[in-house]
Image: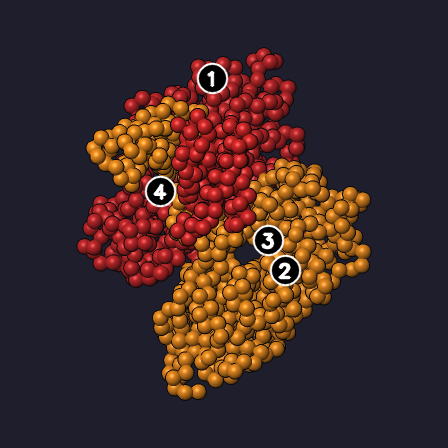
Chain colours: A orange, B red
């Protein structure tokens, strides 16, 4: 170690936002990447499918990148892989279940055979030249989840990943708090910690309480039971299995993502499914209603999900009926409240009874609340702290929490995406930025939809478009055909023929005036048409459709 | 009263939805209307400004309609008036504050002089031929709010309106529970009751607890205090005034809606503002920061609101700075979570400290929770019950609650918008429908945006539009100009010139093929162009823009 050795820590996603978690650590000639998530588009990202981190810095420094280290298998930690491995094919390290889920994603993108997936177990240490990456067992709303410790000769960085402290986890694998304590005792240089639930006082309840609720609900149910949950929550699925067994019900699974997970998790030994419990969704009608549990997707009200389709009679195998009991074992991700509410309403209308979080303890969070965060801070006693995984409000509250625990404000760093936290022997500071941000994925296009396209989509969504076409004789500037006006998303034409007729006259007049004034530049004529129509339409309708003048020359 | 006399109760809005509350009661030759609200558009109602109830039945029976009776002055109870009074100019009854707010709305629409507003006081009874409409004091998150009792010789209908039971309201005017009890004792035929908070156990806290929180926060504050709340919550504003006085701060008001309300409420005596407390927003810099409170709008994160503009330095008079303390004294209306979060993040980034509901008791609901609902049911002991003001899930839970209190399931009616509850001497039943539903308002257009326009706007918002223009010689079917392709919201053209060039060739080929096959109907040619381009673009981009072929003939 020389005096000049610099450790650079850069969030490439997951700060000032919920989603697309990704952190880069650079030391000497090596770079490691922690997680590679995606984010679902914000409301104003019209037509966008997913959003991934901008990794141009990594691509530019390809040779340095030694691997991507995954903390767990949630989309916001692994979902960017299929896009990013195409540009940056480096080893991917993760636990068995995590990589099992990654495999299903890579298969969908035809990348499975070319990818280098390396399975680790909690406790394993991956040794690089300048860094050692240690996987530490934690608890989260998915099995086989880990925190990471990155050991360098400048000190140790602890990245919690997503976590909660569950003293009674379903699989018995409690968080390795002793290791956190040991690291703390030896000295932690920097802590990066999950801020998702920092606004919530107290503790997150154990996953086990949900099982108790299930048992109570199953006990009372007289018809079919349908449970929707996050597909990846293997512990939750295990508890549904347990309750089904206890009350002598068969389990059928419907919904692509949960079918995949059940298959992967069972194959890898993360689910304990007794012989004979599982039946095909095709066979549910061969049993009494009170012998049936259906595990399904759609806990976020996604319109194309199995549960949503069941609720609107569009599901091929299951139709909701009087006497069904539906459990929505999830909490709405912000932005999904209305979608979920719509499904709940629809289920009630079909005659089902519905349990959801405002009515019963059918869900617990996977993230640590304030007291749990305090424990991790207290055990690791880091020199420096960077809150991650949260919007600015969460990062700020997490910084407050660290201060209250006695940390010096100057040792706490709230970074933006791309901002470099530089640590040397002498201290730490935020020092500059690397290229970073978001890349929008729309269909096959990765990054080709930019602000202009999004702005146009927004404009179109508000008031539609009016296309004005006219064919003009190049030789004498006379109108040969048109002007024709075709509108979409503006007004329904049959109801506004007069308006369109009047608009045509105005366009004709505008063109004639231009030409008689010797204005022959199409750009000027188009701009005149646009101005005149915009004013006219706004006066008549108080709407501002996009106006697209097209002049054809012959 | 003859055996045939029928009382018809029809929700025209506010059931199976949150918003645009409106209920119609018809008896013999008279109709009365309770409330006349608006709703803000759902996410998929692209470009729509507001949604109002369809009142075609009322217009058809204009002569029968004796008046609109308002329970209180919230938008979802009065906001439809400016649109509906234009078609149905009947007397409007309400308390002083309610009509004071209505006046500001009617003024904006130039309807004030032609409207017939009739002020009532809680306790008043408006006598019609066949019905008597009694206003009964209740409590809600706006002052001067009432429930209604409609007396007919078939029995009495009680409509709670929006309410909560606050034993210590700010203005001292507690809900007239004695009157509810008295009506119950005499016999209530039908209860219609607010279902908004039926999913919440226990009681809604008194408005007064918010004042205590304000005092605690004000005590600690060392800089400016900025409070955003619902403009119409006069009690909340009074408490802000009280805390400002107590801690020797001046109050400035910013934001059109709250400026209006403060003016109206003060003029009508609903706000007690000590001499010298109020200062102009222009003068805030003439005081020390710790002498200032700013009351403002934007508690729902509305992007154009005063608070949002302060947070992004777009407000002309106030810029958020280090040391400011912002209180968001409201709870997110479902769907607004992300907007609010964005403002909170921005405020923190500017260096303010922010209090919001997840951190402190800075807001209480205006609606009754389960125990309050039980009290009203128990006091009124209605023969029949119709839950109102809620989505289906809420109406259903409210029905469960009534059943648990001993009501017979067959006496509970969950109606849809337009569904007629018919009550005679012999019984009650849901019997048919009247024309009803929603009317979309977009700019000056009331009801002219229908499903086709909305579907087009949605399509445009997802993948944009590709306009294909070609000019053809009518005499020989030859292409004279084009095909030209102009796209908006699809891809940024400069980055996809090859794609567009290839598309043009395909279009040209399609047209030539049609013409050489003697296909000369433009509709067929257009449809061919559309099919070919759609398949081509989907294959190349996995996107499905709207395709608009235009053929000009010369």
Q: Is residue B188 left or right of residue B328?
A: right
Residue A281 drawn at (x, y percent): 74, 48
Would you name the residue on which mark 3 appears? A330
Q: Quadrant of the N terminus of chain B?
A: top right
Q: Are marks 1 and 2 in contact (CB under 8 Å)?
A: no
Residue denoted by label 2: A107
Depth check: B246 or A147 in front? A147
Q: Chain of mark 3?
A: A
Q: Which residue appears at 52% of the width and 67% of the height?
A: A88
The answer to whether residue B84 is above or below residue A381 is above
**Residue beneath the point at 49% across and 80% down:** A156
In three-dimensional space, the C-alpha distance between marks 1 and 3, rounded to whole angstroms, equals 47 Å
Q: Residue B505: x, y in percent?
A: 48, 43
Q: Do discs 2 and 4 share a chain?
A: no
Residue B60's disc is: 1
Residue B483: x %, y % from top left: 43, 39
Query: Few, some or many C-alpha atoms within 10 Å of disc 3 (few <14, some 14-19, many ≥20)?
Result: many
Query: How many numbered markers are drawn?
Result: 4
Q: In the depicted view, which residue is nearer to us: A224 or A453?
A: A453
Q: Is residue A476 above or below residue A250?
A: above
Cα–Cα gap, marks 2 and 3: 28 Å
Marks 2/3 same chain: yes
- Of the numbered discs 4 and 1, the one sitting upstream in the chain is 1
Is A185 situated above or below B456? Answer: below
Alpha carbon separation for disc pair 4 and 1: 36 Å
Query: Disc 4 on helix, strand or loop?
Result: loop
- Mark identifier at residue A313: none
User: Disc 2 vs disc 3: Cβ atoms closer than 8 Å?
Assistant: no
């Amino acid at each position: 170690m020389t005096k000049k050795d610099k450790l650079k820590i850069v969030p490439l996603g997951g700060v000032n936002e919920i989603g697309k978690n990704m952190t880069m650590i650079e030391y000497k000639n090596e770079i490691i990447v922690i997680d590679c998530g995606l984010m679902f588009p914000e409301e104003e990202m019209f037509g966008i499918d997913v959003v991934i981190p901008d990794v141009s810095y990594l691509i530019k420094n390809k040779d340095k990148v030694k691997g991507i280290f995954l903390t767990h298998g949630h989309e916001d930690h692994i979902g960017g892989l299929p896009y990013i491995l195409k540009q940056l094919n480096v080893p991917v390290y993760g636990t068995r279940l995590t990589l099992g889920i990654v495999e299903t994603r890579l298969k969908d993108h035809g990348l499975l055979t070319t990818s280098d997936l390396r399975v680790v177990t909690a406790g394993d240490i991956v040794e690089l030249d300048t860094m050692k990456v240690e996987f530490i067992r934690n608890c989260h709303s998915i099995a086989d989840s880990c925190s990471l410790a990155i050991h360098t000769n400048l000190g140790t960085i602890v990245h919690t990943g997503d976590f909660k402290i569950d003293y009674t986890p379903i699989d018995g694998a409690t968080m390795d708090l002793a290791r956190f304590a040991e690291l703390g005792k030896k000295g932690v240089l920097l802590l990066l910690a999950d801020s998702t639930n920092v606004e919530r006082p107290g503790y997150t309840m154990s996953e086990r309480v949900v099982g108790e609720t299930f048992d109570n609900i199953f006990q009372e149910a007289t018809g079919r039971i349908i449970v929707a949950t996050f597909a990846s929550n293997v512990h939750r699925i295990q508890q549904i299995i347990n309750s089904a067994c206890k009350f002598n019900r068969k389990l059928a699974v419907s919904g692509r993502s949960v079918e995949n997970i059940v298959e992967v998790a069972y194959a890898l030994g993360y689910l304990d499914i007794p012989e004979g419990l599982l039946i095909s969704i095709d066979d549910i009608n061969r049993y009494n209603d009170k012998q049936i549990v259906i595990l399904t997707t759609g806990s976020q009200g996604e319109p194309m999900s199995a549960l949503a389709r069941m609720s609107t009679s569009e599901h091929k195998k299951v139709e909701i009926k009087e006497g069904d009991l539906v459990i929505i074992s999830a909490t709405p991700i912000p932005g999904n409240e209305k979608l979920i509410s719509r499904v709940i309403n629809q289920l009630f209308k079909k005659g089902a009874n519905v349990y959801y979080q405002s009515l019963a303890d059918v869900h617990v969070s996977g993230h640590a609340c304030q007291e749990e965060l305090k424990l991790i801070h207290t055990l690791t006693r880091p020199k420096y702290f960077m809150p991650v995984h949260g919007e600015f409000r969460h990062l700020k509250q997490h910084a407050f929490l660290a201060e209250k625990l006695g940390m010096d404000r100057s040792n706490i760093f709230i970074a933006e995406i791309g901002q470099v936290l530089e640590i040397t022997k002498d201290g730490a500071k935020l020092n500059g930025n690397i290229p970073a941000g978001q890349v929008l994925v729309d269909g096959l296009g990765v990054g080709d939809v930019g602000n202009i396209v999004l702005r146009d989509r927004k404009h179109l969504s508000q008031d539609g478009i009016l296309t004005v076409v006219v064919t003009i004789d190049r030789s004498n500037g006379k109108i040969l055909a048109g002007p024709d006006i075709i509108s979409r998303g503006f007004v329904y034409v049959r109801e506004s023929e007069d308006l369109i007729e009047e608009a045509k006259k105005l366009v004709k007049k505008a063109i004639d005036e231009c030409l008689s004034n010797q204005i022959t530049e199409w750009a000027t004529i188009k701009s005149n048409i646009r101005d005149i129509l915009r004013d006219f339409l706004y006066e008549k309708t108080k709407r501002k459709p996009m106006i697209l003048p097209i002049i054809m020359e012959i």
